């Protein structure tokens, strides 16, 4: 009789029930987490360097976050703010608006994902300016919706065979003179080191040569 671990059983269940479009970076099934650590279903301990892809600024299960979530769930779990407003939404918006730089009166809209925020920002900009064009950088990632894939520069990884895409999106090389991409035309810098330059490319007469995304 073949004996399998709980991880192997759950990974088999994952392959059986979840489509391949949802990738899995590591063959780990999390059971619990605290601060910067995760324990899998076998009891193994890991340091979490991902943090839900950059959204757990205070780590897993911070007591203040847990208490706030429990207090909210004890009162209201969900109403859909467009239908029935609630004070927590309003107060959080007020706190964020007060921190907006420049002294301007800001307003805040809460959304579910980063790509939803990006698409709404584009809608707002187009409505305000009456100009449809959008600029996106090469080697970027903006999500898996239609506009997100259009904006994303990593076409081979995230957008291959999914077209046609949204119109009026234009690509520019990302201006990173300190970590140039392969194919960047370099010059001799003021330090005299061959193949380097201390002058950003947007201030030089010769623009960098970037490979196609």
Image (tube, rainbow, N blue to C red):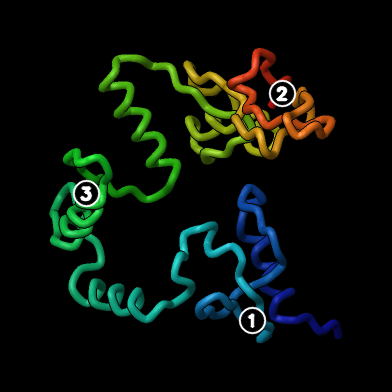
For marks 1 and 3, give the CA distance: 42 Å
| SS state under label 1 | loop
* Residue 31, x across and y down, in percent: 57, 79
Specify which label sits upstream in the sequence, 2 or 3: 3
* Residue 145, x across and y down, in percent: 49, 37
104 in relation to 20, above or below: above
Q: Evaluate if marks 1 and 3 touch, with contact meaning CB atoms under 8 Å apart.
A: no
Residue drawn at x 18%, y 47% is 82
Toward the viewer: 96 or 19? 96
Please tell me whether mark 1 or mark 3 is closer to you in this view.
3
* Residue 131, x across and y down, in percent: 35, 14
Q: Evaluate if marks 2 and 1 touch, with contact meaning CB atoms under 8 Å apart.
A: no
| SS state under label 2 | loop
Identify residue for label 1: 41
For marks 2 and 1, give the CA distance: 45 Å
Identify residue for label 2: 210
Packing grade of label 2 (10 A; few <14, some 14-19, many >=20) is some
Identify residue for label 3: 97
């Amino acid at each position: 009789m073949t004996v399998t671990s709980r991880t192997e059983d759950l990974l088999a269940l994952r392959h059986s029930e979840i489509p391949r479009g949802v990738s899995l970076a590591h063959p780990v099934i999390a059971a619990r987490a605290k601060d910067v650590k995760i324990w899998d279903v076998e009891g193994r301990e890991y340091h979490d360097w991902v943090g839900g892809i950059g959204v757990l600024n205070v780590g897993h299960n911070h007591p203040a976050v847990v208490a706030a979530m429990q207090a909210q769930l004890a009162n209201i779990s969900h109403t859909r703010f467009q239908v029935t407003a609630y004070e927590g939404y309003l107060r959080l918006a007020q706190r964020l608006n007060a921190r907006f730089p420049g002294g301007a009166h800001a307003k805040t809209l809460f959304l579910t994902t980063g790509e939803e925020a990006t698409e709404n920002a584009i809608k707002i900009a187009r409505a305000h300016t009456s100009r449809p064009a959008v600029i996106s950088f090469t080697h970027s990632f903006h999500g898996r919706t239609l506009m997100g894939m259009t904006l994303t520069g990593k076409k081979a990884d995230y957008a291959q065979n999914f077209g046609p895409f949204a119109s009026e999106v234009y690509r520019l090389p990302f201006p990173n003179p300190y970590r140039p991409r392969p194919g960047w035309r370099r010059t001799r810098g003021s330090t005299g080191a061959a193949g380097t330059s201390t002058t950003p490319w947007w201030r030089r007469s010769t623009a960098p040569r970037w490979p196609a995304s």
